[in-house]
Structure formats: structure tokens, C-alpha cells
Image (spheres, rainbow, N blue to C red):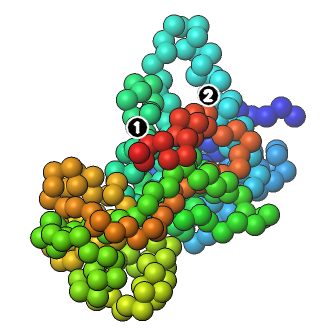
């Protein structure tokens, strides 16, 4: 029995929307009729394509494979029409997720090679690690940017690409750093704006303070780089940040780096899902962003 491509298109629409009701409304179908179409496809393929968790639909492993094929099939159909009609107007989409706390300057630096391409639309979403990795698994995201790798074992479907690394600095207003002083003195005398304790940078900072036998005064613990940047500008204390976070302030002289460097590095990662049909834009972007090239 041949495959019914109408059923496949309905499945494809629901898989990308992630919501049966919304898709039914968009296609001007009843929800029950759409469910029947997908059920018939599942019967033809011999596998469930979705599983329901609460009110959300999530692709099964068979569903992810079916979606990869559906993407290829309908993309080929669009290319056929474009080739024979001479209309190459369709834009490619790249869906990128990033930690809500990740530096915006870093994100722009990584995406810069494709942001100016008129044939590419970049959809950028932010969220927590759990939300972003789930987005990868459900194929709602092609790539996730993080400053720590996800759990890694033989059963994990993720691929981790280290795409950058930069030393972290101690940054503050010129008034706070008017004299060149060693880090031990700064730790003993100045309040600090630090990442939260679940950060690898914070762990390294605490270890450094312990080696120096200093207990620093903590003015604020912040999990958002934009807020850390703002607090440093407001002279709340010295901030432990990668210079890329405060590029504009350093260039303007509003903030400066301490002369003594903490020798702490922050790594940046691009996380992808092992897919049979990966988005070709992802590989292109990874190749254009060799390790540390965009960090200077």
C-alpha cells in the first residue's frame, strides 16, 4: 500500500507546530479529523509518531525519523517548483536556542556569518537548559548555544561542539580600579558581582579565593550577563565577566579591566542533535566559527 502524502503533510504540519489544536485551526480542519489523518499514517508506518506529555505533543523516535524524511520530501518539492518556475524566493530557516543568561555579544558574534544572508531567516529563542535541550529533541531547534556542555553518555542524543573560549576578567569603573593592585587586595577590599554558584566560572573564582585565603565581599550573585553588566556600570562592585560581555563599556572607558588577571576561562558550546537529515545551515555555521575566531 503506497504512502498517503496528504497524511504525511498533516503530520509534518503538527510536528513543526507542536500543537494539534493550533494546526487544525490553521489548516481549517476539525481537531478530530486531523487526529484521524495522523492515526492512519501511524497505522501505515506501524509506529506511534507522537506521545502526549500533559497537554503537549512530543515526537517519538519514529516520529523524529518521519519528520526528517518529511522535511526532505517537502523541501525537494519546493526546490522542484522553484527550479521549473525560475522562482528562488524561499528563505531557509535556522532555529537557534540560547541560554537566557548568555552574553548577547557572544550570540551576535557567533551568528554574524549568516545574519546578513538574504536567503536565511534566523529564529532566535532563549530559555533554560532543560527547555533548550527539549527543543532540540523535539526538532523545534536546530542548534543551542550554552556556556556549559550537557550531560554526555552513550545514550545522550546530543553532539557538543566547543566553539569558543575566553579568559574572564575583573571589570569595574575607573574609580574602583584607579590603582594597579593584585587580585588578593581587590578581593579583600572591594565588593564583587559574581555569577551564581552553578556556574563553572564561579566555581573557579571560589577556588582562587580559597587559595589566596581571602573571603570576598559579595555585593550580588547574578545569573544574567545583561544585569551583571548593568550593576558594574552602576558601580555596585567589581564584576567577574568575559570582556565580550562589556565590549562597549570597555571601548568607551566607562569600565576597565583590572591589571591582575584571574586566569579563569569560560567556554562556549554549540549543541546539536544527532539527526539523519541535519539542517545544512548548522554545519555551515560551525565551519565558519572555528574555535575562538569570533572572540578575538
User: In whole angstroms, how far apart are the C-alphas of marks 1 and 2?
Assistant: 25 Å
Left or right: 293 in relation to 261:
right
Question: In this figure, what is the number of numbered marks?
Answer: 2
Quadrant in which the C terminus appears: top left
On residue 75, the disc is 2
Left or right: 4 in relation to 178:
right
Quadrant of the rendered image containing residue 276: top right
N-term-proximal mark, 1 vs 2: 2
In this view of the protein, which residue sits in the foreground, 6 or 218? 218
Give percent across and percent down for residue 277: 70, 38
Q: Is 221 rendered above or below residue 231?
A: below
Q: Secondary structure at mark 1?
A: helix
Give percent across and percent down for residue 127: 44, 63
Q: Residue at x 55, y 14 (%)?
A: 82
Q: Residue at x 29, y 65 (%)?
A: 259
Q: Is 167 rendered above or below residue 37?
A: below
Front disc: 1 or 2: 1
Q: Residues within 10 Å of mark 2 (few under 14, many from 20)?
A: few
Q: Residue tagged by mark 1? A: 112
Give percent across and percent down for residue 232: 21, 69
In this view of the protein, which residue sits in the foreground, 70 or 6? 70
Amino acid at each position: 500500500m503506497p504512502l498517503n502524502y496528504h497524511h504525511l503533510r498533516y503530520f509534518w504540519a503538527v510536528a513543526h507546530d507542536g500543537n494539534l489544536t493550533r494546526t487544525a485551526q490553521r489548516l481549517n480542519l476539525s481537531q478530530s479529523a486531523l487526529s484521524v489523518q495522523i492515526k492512519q499514517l501511524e497505522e501505515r508506518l506501524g509506529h506511534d509518531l507522537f506521545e502526549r506529555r500533559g497537554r503537549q505533543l512530543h515526537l517519538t523516535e519514529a516520529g523524529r525519523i518521519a519528520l526528517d524524511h518529511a522535511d526532505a520530501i517537502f523541501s525537494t518539492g519546493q526546490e522542484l517548483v522553484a527550479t521549473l518556475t525560475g522562482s528562488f524566493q524561499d528563505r531557509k530557516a535556522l532555529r537557534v536556542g540560547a541560554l537566557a543568561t548568555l552574553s548577547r555579544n557572544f550570540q551576535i558574534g557567533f551568528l554574524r556569518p549568516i545574519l546578513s544572508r538574504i536567503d536565511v531567516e534566523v529564529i532566535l529563542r532563549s530559555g533554560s537548559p532543560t527547555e533548550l535541550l527539549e527543543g532540540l529533541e523535539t526538532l523545534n531547534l536546530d542548534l543551542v548555544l550554552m556556556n556549559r556542555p550537557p550531560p554526555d553518555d552513550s545514550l545522550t542524543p546530543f553532539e557538543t561542539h566547543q566553539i569558543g573560549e575566553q579568559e574572564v576578567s575583573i571589570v569595574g569603573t575607573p574609580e574602583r580600579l584607579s590603582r594597579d593592585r593584585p587580585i588578593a587586595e581587590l578581593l579583600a577590599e572591594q565588593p564583587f558581582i559574581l555569577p551564581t554558584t552553578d556556574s563553572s566560572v564561579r566555581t573557579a573564582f571560589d577556588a582562587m579565593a580559597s587559595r589566596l585565603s581571602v573571603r570576598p565581599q559579595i555585593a550580588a550573585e547574578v545569573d544574567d550577563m545583561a544585569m551583571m553588566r548593568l550593576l558594574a556600570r552602576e558601580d555596585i562592585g567589581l564584576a567577574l565577566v568575559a570582556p565580550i560581555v562589556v565590549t562597549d563599556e570597555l571601548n568607551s572607558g566607562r569600565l576597565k579591566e583590572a591589571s591582575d588577571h584571574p586566569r579563569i576561562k569560560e567556554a562556549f558550546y554549540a549543541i546539536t542533535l544527532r539527526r539523519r537529515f541535519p539542517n545544512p545551515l548548522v554545519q555551515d555555521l560551525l565551519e565558519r566559527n572555528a574555535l575562538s575566531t569570533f572572540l578575538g
